[in-house]
């Protein structure tokens, strides 16, 4: 019988790889694609971001948040802007063979919601998001995730969904 320490959350997150998170295939567009092109691609694929590529290299990322912050309040002509003008350039990437713990650290320390995932051949294969991580944790540690106690003194100031 294996030692229970071997099955600890931290040890599993150190040994399980990004591939276990099942990265999402996302649209990949060129720098000269427009914001409208990116929105259409996100809607069609039901994904929350697009990657901007130059050949095999990921040179930028554009997310639904970017739509709200960089285009939505600028009028219709903003949607004709090219992605190279509004993308987040040189996004942080992670290898499919890196640990899940590495992704969690990068995402929490840098405040990223998405990371581009690079395959063994150096090509981008998609993205992971915090949703991938949370889904993985809920699937592999349901007793821990679903039985977390409420945070003491936590009060929701805003009415969500109303």
Image (spheres, rainbow, N blue to C red):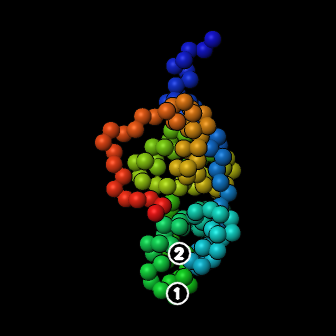
Residue that lies at the very extreme toward the bottom in this rendered image: 77
- Which quadrant of the view contains residue 45? bottom right
Whether residue 14 appears in this view of the structure is: no
Residue located 57% across and 55% down the image? 116
Residue located 52% across and 25% down the image? 8
Whether residue 25 appears in this view of the structure is: yes
- Which quadrant of the view contains residue 135? top right
| First along the sequence among labels 2 and 1 | 1
Circle 1 residues within 10 Å: few <14, some 14–19, many ≥20: few
Say which element carries label 1: helix
Say which element carries label 2: helix
- Compared with residue 66, is residue 139 higher up or lower down, i.e. above or below? above
Point out the frontmost of discs 2 and 1: 1
Picture mark count: 2
- Compared with residue 75, is residue 94 higher up or lower down, i.e. above or below? above
Quadrant position of the N terminus in the picture = top right
Residue 120, percent across and down?
67, 47
Q: Which residue is mark 2?
A: 84
- What's the CA distance linking mark 2 and mark 1? 18 Å
Residue located 50% across and 72% down the image? 67
Residue 28, percent across and down?
65, 66
Residue located 54% across and 44% down the image? 134
Residue that lies at the very extreme toward the left in this rendered image: 153
Circle 2 residues within 10 Å: few <14, some 14–19, many ≥20: some
Residue 9, percent across and down?
52, 29
Residue 108, percent across and down?
43, 47
Q: Which residue is mark 1?
A: 76
- Compared with residue 129, is residue 1 higher up or lower down, i.e. above or below? above
Residue that lies at the very extreme toward the front in this rendered image: 162
Q: Which mark is residue 45?
A: none
**Nearest the eye: 44 or 154:** 154
């Amino acid at each position: 019988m294996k030692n229970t320490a071997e099955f600890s959350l931290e040890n599993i997150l150190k040994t399980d790889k990004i591939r276990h998170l099942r990265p999402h295939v996302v649209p990949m567009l060129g720098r000269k694609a427009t914001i409208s092109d990116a929105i259409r691609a996100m809607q069609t694929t039901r994904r929350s971001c697009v990657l901007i590529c130059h050949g095999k290299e990921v040179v930028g990322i554009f997310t639904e948040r970017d739509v709200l912050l960089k285009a939505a309040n600028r009028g219709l002509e903003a949607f004709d802007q090219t992605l190279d003008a509004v993308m987040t350039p040189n996004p942080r990437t992670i290898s499919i063979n890196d640990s899940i713990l590495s992704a969690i650290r990068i995402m929490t320390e840098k405040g990223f919601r998405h990371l581009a995932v690079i395959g063994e051949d150096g090509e981008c294969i998609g993205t992971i998001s915090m949703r991938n991580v949370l889904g993985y944790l809920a699937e592999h540690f349901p007793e821990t995730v679903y039985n977390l106690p409420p945070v003491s003194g936590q009060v929701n100031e805003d009415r969500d969904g109303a």
